[in-house]
Image (cartoon, rainbow, N blue to C red):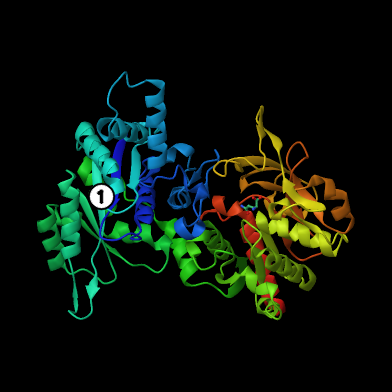
Amino acid sequence: MTRFIFVTGGVTSSLGKGLTAAALGALLQGRGFSVRLRKLDPYLNVDPGTMSPYQHGEVYVTDDGAETDLDLGHYERFTGVPSRRGDNVTTGQIYSKVLAKERRGDYLGATVQVIPHVTDAIKEFVLSDSGGVDFVVCEIGGTVGDIEGLPFLEAIRQLGYELGADRSLFVHLTLVPYLASAGELKTKPTQHSVKELQSVGIKPDIVICRCERTIPLEARRKIALFCNVRPSAVIQGLDVDTIYAVPRAYHEEGLDSEVCRHFGLTAPEPDLSRWDYVTGRIRQPDGEVTIGVVGKYTTLIDSYKSLAEALTHGGVANNVRVKVNWLDSEIFEGEGAIHQLEDVHGILIPGGFGERGSEGKIAAARFARERQVPYFGICFGMQMAVIEAARHLANLPDASSTEFGPTEDPIVGLMTEWTVGNRVERRDTESDKGGSMRLGAYPCVVAAGSHLHDIYGADNISERHRHRYEVNINYRDALERVGMRFAGLSPDGELPEMIELPDHPWFIGVQFHPELKSKPFEPHPLFTSFIEAAVAQSRLM
Ligand code: GLN
């Protein structure tokens, strides 16, 4: 029997609903239950793929090629359960589906309305394809009180009623701010937020209060009284120093036992030793390395969420703290800035789009190659490293990417046709921006005897992609002659997936996004190896 836990948020955004859902999933798993995590996003975009990283942070890509909310990354990192397309839905998708049905005449002449047609489509999504797990934890994006969230709240209200209390539970996350002038923690915003939730017919079973300071017992009792919940169901969510401390913190506050109590379940206490191991290493590392990440969206770190986590995981694997210098690539287009790379122990160029800043990335890749500094190019970062080598090693000064306009030497170009399974995918420059990319998991064959083969310890791998352009295989010979090795190719040999420089201590480019699959307990081998190389570099400096 699948039980459904709905997580809503009030007072403000950015309270960590996603992490709370992920941590709760992990705690239930720790008690021996199977879980799936889902997210309902009330915005009108069909998916976040077309949103600027400044607006929405990272786009998290699943194996089955969906472009989803970054919270799905937390879910996967915390529970190890691979996310799927069906784990994230937006208002845009719900309405597209309802409108398509209306056009087909499926509603048989009915007036199509938010209730019941839109809410039915939302309910169908929540209930579908849960795979018979013990718990589906379903996070509702946005903040209670937002207009666009109303159909979602109405849908989960109905579900609560239809499933009954023994199959559904409502968790509401709020903020208990500390007012310095009053010298007090304030419970009023929580009371108001719960009132708002109750006005749409949802009575929370558990209220989680995010706070910077410990909430006194007295205040918790007050929240329980005003919000109509048991005192033990008022859970304190005190700020912690690392996100990997969240599961233990919630466990100690009694979150998972409160959930079990609600459903009348007895289950063993979760074993949190692997979380303790990770937080222990994060808190007390044996040394530190600095990685320069040369990108475009460096002012909003959420744009590189999975990347930042994967670097931390690489640090955990090597027992060092990874300090990241987020550097705007455009600075390297002017004179004299390149020296800023002199103090870093590794240079990473992450995924990116568009010409702006690309020359700065090429300059950074050149610095790494010439100065023998460990270099990790991810997606755009691989493309820039290949263009750099083509220009400065293979004597192709006009080498460029067709992403930036027509070029004589399209080292990186738009692939217009390739095969997915037994289906041929076609693209052209006019294709819709939403969904015109190579997305999701693709296999890659790793060249025997390569550095990458040592790192992966495998002949065949699968990694997740999100890009329109590809390194042009026609330049392979020219580049291999000057020392760049094409160490990973698509099974048909047409698409270069990984490159390396055998004469460099650590210079690797990959066309996919390995950061999406890294987990605290299972750091991605490329990040483990990159940080190991950075440690070696730090000893030379
Ligand atoms: N802009 C490049 C492309 O579309 C790289 C994309 C990326 O780094 N994810 O191919």
**In which quarter of the view is residue 432 placed?**
top right
Task: State the residue in front, 208 or 390.
Answer: 390
- Against 306, residue 102 (above or below) is above
Residue at the extreme top: 108
Q: Residue furthest left?
A: 225
Give the image location of residue 169, x and y in percent.
24, 43
Quarter of the picture holding the C terminus: bottom right
Q: Is residue 315 left or right of residue 501?
A: left
Amino acid type, label 1: Val
Residue 225: tell me if it is visible.
Answer: yes
Please give the residue where the numbered disc 1 appears in the rendered image.
171
**Depicted 354 relative to depicted 46: above or below:** below
Is 507 on the left or on the right of 33, as rendered?
Answer: right
Q: Nearer the viewer, residue 74 or 123?
A: 123
Specify the quadrant that holds the N terminus. Answer: top left
Quarter of the rendering containing residue 173: bottom left
What residue is at 82 percent from the left and 53 percent from the top?
409
**What is the x, y in percent for residue 244?**
43, 60
